[in-house]
Image (cartoon, rainbow, N blue to C red):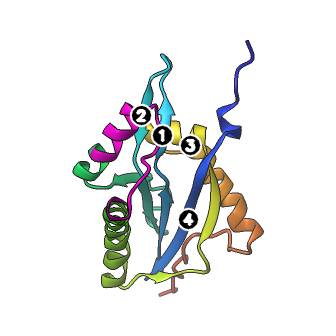
Amino acid sequence: MAETNNANILVGYALYTEFRKDGHTLQVIFTPESMSETTDGTSVYVPCSVWRRQVSSYNPRRPWRSYSQEWNTINNRKEYRLANGGSAETLDEDLAKKYSVAGLVFMDRTFESLVAQSWELHKEPIVVEFSKEDLMDTQSWNTPNALIRRIMRSRKALGFADELFAIPTTTAV
C-alpha cells in the first residue's frame, strides 16, 4: 500500500504577519481549523490557532507559542465534526453568524492587543499553504516547522530583509 505524503495534502491557508516596535519583531501566524486523523484512523478536531514569537537582538531565537479560541467554542465545533465524520456543519444563517463572531473575536483580540501595545505592521501579510503535516504538528502542539520554512522562503521572495529585527549599534566610549 502506498503511503501518502502529508506535506503535499493541502487543508487550508495560514496567514503570516510581522509587526515591529523598538528593535523587536513580533511574528504571528494564523492557522485554520480542520480535522486530522490519528494513527488508528480516528478523526481529531484541530481548532484555528495563533502561533507567535517575539524576537530581538537580545533574544534572536525565541520559541514559537500557540494560542487557540476559548474552549466552549472549540468544543461545540469539535463535537459536531466528530459526530458527522469530520464534516463541517451545514450552518443556518444564525449559527454561521455565531461561529463567525466567535472566530473573529478571537482574532480581533489578538490585533487589539497589538494596537494597544503600539506594534506596527511591517510590510504586507503573507498567505501560505497549510498542509496536513502542519495540521498534525499543530494538533500535537509542536511548532509547524515546514510551515515556517515556507513562510521564510516567501519572505525572501517578497523582498523582506533577512534580518528579523534591528541590531542596535554600539557607540565607542
Q: How far is disc 1 from disc 3 in space, using C-alphas?
A: 19 Å
Q: Considering the numbered disc 2 on the image, is that residue within a helix, a strand or a loop?
A: loop
Labels 4 and 3 touching (C-beta < 8 A): no
Residue tagged 1: 87
Labels 1 and 4 touching (C-beta < 8 A): no
User: In the image, is residue 91 part of the stretch drawn in magenta?
Assistant: yes
Residue 47: percent from left, percent from top = 40, 48
Mark with earlier residue (1, 3):
1
Q: How far is disc 1 from disc 4 in space, using C-alphas?
A: 26 Å
Q: Considering the numbered disc 3 on the image, is that residue within a helix, a strand or a loop?
A: helix
Q: How far is disc 2 from disc 3 in space, using C-alphas?
A: 23 Å
Residue tagged 3: 134
- Disc 2 residue type? Asn
Task: Tell me where the magenta segment starts and ends, as one range.
Answer: 76-95
Question: Residue at horizontal 44%, vertical 50%?
Answer: 90
Q: How far is disc 1 from disc 2 in space, using C-alphas?
A: 6 Å
Q: How far is disc 2 from disc 4 in space, using C-alphas?
A: 31 Å
Residue tagged 2: 84
